[in-house]
Image (cartoon, rainbow, N blue to C red):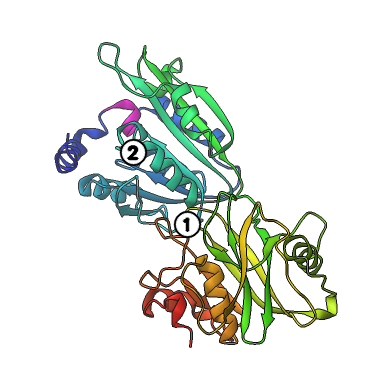
Amino acid sequence: MGELDSDVYWDTAADRFDEEPDHGLREPAVRAAWAARMRAWLPDTPADVLDLGCGTGSLAELAAEQGHRVTAVDRSPRMAALARAKLAGTGARVLLGDAAEPPVAEGRFDVVLVRHVFWALPDPVAALRRWARLLRRGGRMVLVEGRWGEADPVGFRARELAAMVRPLAEHTEIEQLAHDTALWGRPVRDERYAAIVRIKPPRRHTEIVDVHLVLRRGDEVLLGRRVNTGYADGLLHAPSGHVEDGEDVLTALIRETHEEVGVVLRPEDVAVALVMQHRAPGGGARIGWFFEADADGHEPVNREPEKCSELGWFPLDALPDDMVAYCRAGLEAYRAGERFVLHLHEPGDEIAHDPEGPGRAVVLADGACSTMAATNSAAPSRREDDTP
């Protein structure tokens, strides 16, 4: 059934939808059974509950009666109209929209409630990821699903749904429901269950920290050509390396400089030149500290020929194109006197500097942080070599 056909079907079915005992909850025993389950599934204190694919709003009404702040969403205009009528006076709001992509903001809800909708979505796993983003820290999904029909069943078995939510879940509890005939108003023989999924809290943001040396000889800087590293081989890059556990960035810079090019620097020989958050195409972001030092009295040597095929001096105002893009962008920003830069590749970008490619360098100057969103969306792209 296509999307348009589905909309017509549910609009047509709306006026008779509540005739099913578990849809309309008109029978006192059925209503009481669902109310008891809802009290167990939802938080003890008033919470923000999002009911997706709410139909005529029967479960949303129970949640509202139990003191929760309810937002209900359905893509059928007729279903949504009936839900508004049912929920009138409860404080709940009803929105017209797709359950898979509901028209609500992320991080605003304590519970995402979905009954008999998940199985029918074209991309249920993508929907789960979207729903998880709608939840606050400590939030949960309540998914009432099943594998319905004995001759030609549809839906997911509980173990299948549990596997789909596992990457998102801190804990998943499955409650089998088929045996509770009060919920359905009749005996049922297929699989019906609720999955109460506690979503993992977001991981604390962590990034690798690396250090880069801008070693100056007059108007030239030292670059080395990478080889046998598995990343950006054949491209030029400043001497650099990762900060190791227990090191500060200055100690790491001094160690890496000696290990790579044999130059012994003292802390007073170097100064912070630039801090850059950078990201490789398809990779994670990291923080790069660029330090500057004068080469007077130091003669660099290639101490890691297995990782570097050559060292050379290059004019800072005419850098070569065959460089790692973010390093080239960092040196251009350094030459322009900038101190804080973002250089975040998008998937599909080249690792190498591309004079004709999209600009990824964004300078963070005084006052820029508050206008970054506007800058990124409205300002023309700046190539790495556009720095004045």
Q: How many marks?
A: 2
Task: Using the image, tell me which numbered label, if any, was put on residue 303.
Answer: none
Q: Residue at x 20, y 46 (%)?
A: 78
Q: Residue at x 40, y 28 (%)?
A: 145
Q: Which segment did they paint magenta?
A: 20-24
Q: In the rendered view, would you say 101 is above or below 188? A: below
Residue 213 appearing in the image: yes
Dot placed on the residue nearer the N-terminal end, 1 or 2: 2
State the quadrant of the N terminus.
Answer: top left
Task: Using the image, tell me which numbered label, if any, was put on residue 123.
Answer: 2
State left or right for residue 5 relative to residue 374: left
Q: In the rendering, at what x and y percent does residue 56 appear?
A: 30, 41
Q: Dividing the picture into quarters, in which one does residue 288 lie?
A: bottom right
Mark 2 element type:
loop
Mark 1 element type:
loop
Q: Residue at x 77, y 55 (%)?
A: 244
Q: Nearer the viewer, residue 206 or 68?
A: 206
Q: In the rendered view, would you say 295 is above or below 249? A: below
Amino acid type assigned to the residue bearing label 1 in the image? Pro
Q: In the rendering, at what x and y percent does residue 166 appear?
A: 53, 33
Label 2 crowding class (10 Å Cα cut-off): few <14, some 14-19, many 20+? few
Q: Nearer the viewer, residue 336 or 61?
A: 336
Task: Using the image, tell me which numbered label, if any, was put on residue 281.
Answer: 1
